[in-house]
Image (cartoon, rainbow, N blue to C red):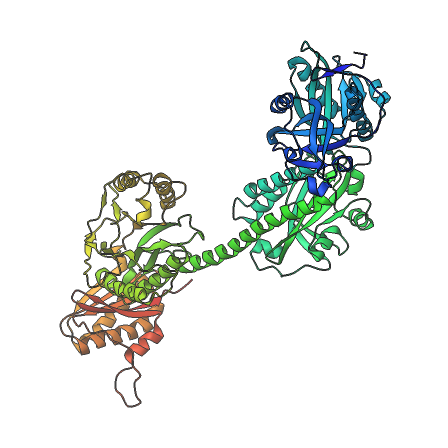
Amino acid sequence: MDDTRGVVSGEAWDTYPGGERWATAAVDAKGVIARWSADAEALLGYRPAEAVGRAARALLSVDPPASARRALAGGEPWSGRITAHHRDGGRREVQLLAFPLRTGDEGTRWLLAAAAASPRPGHDETLMWRAFTGSGVPIAIYGTDLRLLHANEELCRVIGRTEADMRALGTGFLPESRTNADVQRALRRVLGTGEAVTTRTFHRASADRRDRAWALSLAPLKDPDGQVTAIVLTGFEISEEYWAREGLALLSEAGTRIGTTLDVTRTAQELASMPVPRFADFVSVDLLDSVLRGDEPTPGPASGEVLMRRVAHCARAREAPEGATRIGEVASYPEASPPARCLATGRAVLTGPWDPDYRAWMANRGRHGRLPDLGVHSLVAAPLVARGNTLGVALFSRRTHTTTFAEDDLTLAEQLVGRAAVSIDNARRYTRERGTAETLQRSLLPRGLSPQSAVEVASRYLPADSQYGVGGDWFDVIPLSGSRVALVVGDVVGHGIHASATMGRLRTAVRTLADIDLPPDELLTHLDDVVGRLASENTDPVGDEDIGASCLYAVYDPVSRLFCAARAGHPPPALATPDGTVSLLELPGGPPLGLGDLPFESAEFEIPEGSTIVLYTDGLIENRTHDITSSIDELCEILTHPSPSLETTCDTVLRTLLAPRPEDDVALLLARTRALDAGQVVTWNLPAEPALVSDARDHAITQLATWGLEELTFTTELVISELFTNAILHAEGPVQLRLIRDRALTCEVSDTSTTAPHLRRARVYDEGGRGLLLVAQLTDRWGTRQIPSGKAIWAELALPTG
């Protein structure tokens, strides 16, 4: 289309020479004035500060004509006369042109061009042409062949080409192929549908450092018959608003994508990955080693040379020359380098090949050579600072094919890194607190279960997914006298450090009570008193109001193969015998610990050698995926066909009964019973007569020779003499002497007295009182325990080595 005629709202628009500049303004989708030119001030008298923010309708003296209202409602261009208020109180009749500038979700903006209405009829077309040529907004007119017909002065200025040059380009007038493609698609759509189209594109002039964003509105110019005769394009620069929205969107996304876990390394990787490629082509995150350890970093800025460890980086391209430091390596940043400068000032630093310090730093950095030569044209170093503590630095770089960083990018980088720094510091503090809690937990639970002759054991402890990963469940395996062993599981109500600390106190109490060899029911009675005292002492306002706990305490004797147990509000143990029979042991159901004044009862069972005893806390059988009955059935099914390895059986039980994230703490203890060989235990029942002390010594000496333990003869004689003599002097009835050869040699003397002996300081002229002191000095351990017929006093001697 070579003629220069078009149609706007059904009226001819002819070619006229340019003239005076028109007043221009922009109105947003709500009808509020967003921009006000100096020519608009000259026309109506209102300064920009007085006009911007006012409703455009408030400037009208008379309502616009119906044709204008219809055009506005339909988003179509309109031209005509209106009457407006002047600031001096008078009225002005103006010729108005209104062009829609649709910007997507925000609705339709409007470009207004106005001039004082000519009193002479027939000159509207001249004014319209003057508005076209003199408008401060880029405007172009295309023919139906999509070739450029006219471009106003503002468009020529923005593009940097004359109208003739742009016409010579044919279908395109912008040097960027992407922009041409955007415009051509929009033109074809308008031509095909006959409806206005809004699109968005970007253009960068040769002097610009970043893309400019433009909202383009393309509207059809129709003849009286409704046929499209031309297309008018108007542009509205939205760079400031666009980049502001992009920055806010990036920060909003950072709020959801960075800090999803309480892991320092994972959070750093999220910071490195999220801005690529929208904000940078390469991002790296380096942290101080103290942050990775969870230690408190040094407050305030860092100065001088700084050593930091590369924790994460992410690149747009597969080969990233910026990745001169590998993950996990320590990088040294000289005082003049951008990372060290930003840490010293606490502000982001913009640098690039134009900066001598940058060139000096890059010339001596990394394995990949000089980064400026590899296309990096700008870099932003932003400090990771949270709560006044310096954590590290994030580096953002761009390469040749992307826009160079500008000063306003520093603010966005600081805000982005600032949000991430808080998440990293939270992860650091969590690492420290979790490490403290785990150290506490490890100190309270058995670090390793020492080998026992009585049982082979395997255990698992799985805290619920609480804040610190610790809980109140515990287990223990306690060696007792006579090669016996105590098996314990317990559960303190609640999770976290408070429950874990309470658990530690109860575990210590159980070990203390076990050392005096109390029967299971008596031990739980004393432990119940301990829980009651702890509850009365609990004045922590943030702790639980009441302290509750359950416990199962059992003793297994490998000599008699007797298993004696009592429980306090705890699930009963399961027993799997070698013949494949599995059952829950019928223990009396005692009350939970802490209620007070309620009895506990023990039950005793003789179990075959090679049986597996399973002790557990209620977290194993009470969960959402299984009810208690089905959990116990599945446990019994697993034990019916157990693995030869107790460790494997533990894993099978947990994998079968537990959800991936347990809702409660779980402690599991498996013990496979053993029995001492008959040749390892010898027993003599002797009358309580002083003359038989020598016989007791002779029996022991003979047995030691049989066992090949002659080295222990002298010490054993002294120990047996003292223990046997003590029994004769302070008890009545028969005395039993027993020797057990296990991991140690145990000498045990039993009598009918219930009075326990104790060490005392003998005076110079006392005839007695030195026997137990002598025993304590000659043996590794000694003690006494109550038995149904009275008491037993025992002493252990280490076996000879070699």
- Picture coordinates of residue 608, whole percent (x, y): 23, 48
Q: Is residue 257 visible?
A: yes
Q: Quadrant of the C terminus?
A: bottom left
Note whether 765 is above or below 146 in the view shown: below
Note whether 278 is above or below 524 in the view shown: above
Q: In screen coordinates, is 588 left or right of 255?
A: left
Front residue of 234/796: it is 234
Q: In screen coordinates, is 752 left or right of 386?
A: left
Front residue of 44/664: it is 44
At 36% from the left edge and 61% from the top edge, which residue is drawn?
A: 502
Residue pushed farthest bottom?
765
Residue 646 figure quarter: top left
Residue 119 figure quarter: top right
- Picture coordinates of residue 501, whole percent (x, y): 39, 61
Front residue of 503/646: it is 503
Front residue of 33/744: it is 33
- Picture coordinates of residue 422, whole percent (x, y): 57, 51
Note whether 772 is above or below 213 in the view shown: below
